[in-house]
Image: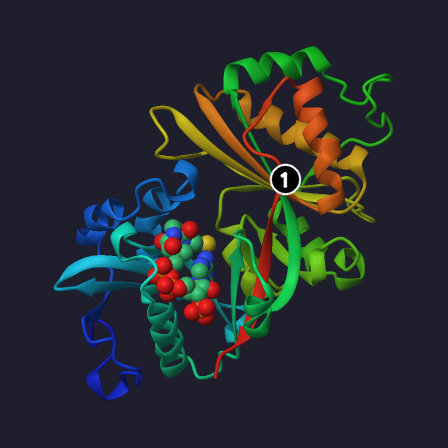
Amino acid sequence: MKIENSLPCHQLPEVHPHNELQFTVATEEDFDDIMAISQDIYGGLDYLPSRFQAWLQETNRTVILARKQGKVIALESVCVIDDGETMLVEGLRVAPQERGKGVAGVLLRFCSQLVKAKHPEVKVSRLTRDDQLGAKDFQKYRLITKQGILLVRFCAEDLKLRIAELGLNMGSAGDGLHPSSTPVRLEPEEVIQIFLNNGVMQDILPNGTIVQDWQPFKPLSSNMAILLKKDIDWMVDDVSCPSVASLCTFPIRVPIGNDWYYLNIDMFGKDLTLALQQLVCHLRSHTDTLKGHVMCQVFLDPPLWRPMADFFKETLKVELVKEYTEQCVVESDVV
Ligand SMILES: CC(C)(COP(=O)(O)OP(=O)(O)OC[C@H]1O[C@@H](n2cnc3c(N)ncnc32)[C@H](O)[C@@H]1OP(=O)(O)O)[C@@H](O)C(=O)NCCC(=O)NCCS
């Protein structure tokens, strides 16, 4: 087992040999090979094609490839966050013909040791799993939080009309949405002020964590700097005393077909009415100019899943892609 393009030899971590595998740091030239092992990942919602180039530029991130006889067979990205305490594992994938042979396990251990060698201050590894976890998994993981996943699909132009029918004043009587409060879109300074204020956000954020899409961040200045570089709309119901906060990405292209986009909305808080208001505001702002099809994934407190799914189906006439699923943010010690 060897790694190229990364650390000088004397700094290489010791790993148990998995003789056929070599490890390299991914470069732009590897893009096509990575796409070749990524067919059909996440039901076509793979974010990697649109993020790969940017990932290579991030100074706190390393993208590692596992190769067999020189051929790319697996990828994992590791990113150091939470003031250097946490290693975030993302993008894990193994070529279909190589699955079930322990490759992911070897790659995970290799990356963990690589990060520990480069960043001895890293204490824990965090990742998000949306598959069924069992008792065996919870022997190695601590659960940080669980979120419901609501996945819907729509044509942007159709949804725009539907939202216009709801009326400009979302809070008008009869639509079940409060007239009294209008969601506030936050400026970066307000985001910092509100999200770094523990007293204000403690009851809203799941286990004190800002889960953006699948990435868990502790509310720390260093993490806010990472988050604020992303194209995200931040919203709350009330700047001084929020009950619901939400983050919505700008649409990114996904490889399901031509003109397919992915929109992610993270909803924090338990008040359904306020959550629906913010949902509609985000959808309105992103369908205003967008042309094409959208897969929209909302991560939310599990009890809000059913009523929000009903709102999508009955009020917005939007199709659910799948029934209830959830994602678990989990953590384990890096030793
Ligand atoms: C999930 C996937 C990477 C597993 O690869 P694999 O080489 O078949 O897995 P292994 O044979 O090493 O065995 C599974 C091990 O990986 C772990 N694993 C499975 N999915 C995982 C995930 N998403 N994140 C971290 N670990 C995972 C299992 O818990 C198991 O660990 P254990 O050995 O401690 O019990 C592979 O099936 C794949 O590429 N699937 C499509 C992409 C995907 O769903 N990626 C998940 C990203 S969230």
- On the image, the x and y values in percent for residue 235 come to 68, 40
Residue furthest left as drawn = 69
Q: Nearer the viewer, residue 78 or 250?
A: 78
Local secondary structure at mark 1: loop
Q: Nearer the viewer, residue 222 or 10?
A: 10
Q: Answer whether residue 295 is visible to the viewer in this image.
A: yes
Give the image quarter of residue 260: top left
- On the image, the x and y values in percent for residue 3 come to 22, 74
Q: Answer whether residue 59 is visible to the viewer in this image.
A: no
In the displayed structure image, the side of residue 25 where residue 171 appears, left or right:
right
Query: In the displayed structure, would residue 151 be above or below residue 55?
Result: above
Q: Residue at x 75, y 56 (%)?
A: 201
- On the image, the x and y values in percent for residue 261 come to 44, 30
Give the image quarter of residue 182: top right
Please name the residue that numbered disc 1 is placed on: 324
Circle 1 Cα neighbour tier, 10 Å, few/some/many (<14 / 14–19 / ≥20): some
Query: In the displayed structure, would residue 132 be above or below residue 278?
Result: below
In the displayed structure image, the side of residue 287 where residue 292 appears, left or right:
left
Q: Nearer the viewer, residue 242 or 49?
A: 49
- Amino acid type of the residue that numbered disc 1 sits on in the rendered structure: Tyr
- On the image, the x and y values in percent for residue 305 come to 70, 38
Q: Nearer the viewer, residue 45 or 216?
A: 45
Figure disc tally = 1
In which of the image's four quarters is ligand 1 placed?
bottom left
Q: Residue at x 65, y 17 (%)?
A: 163
Query: In the displayed structure, would residue 52 be above or below residue 11?
Result: above
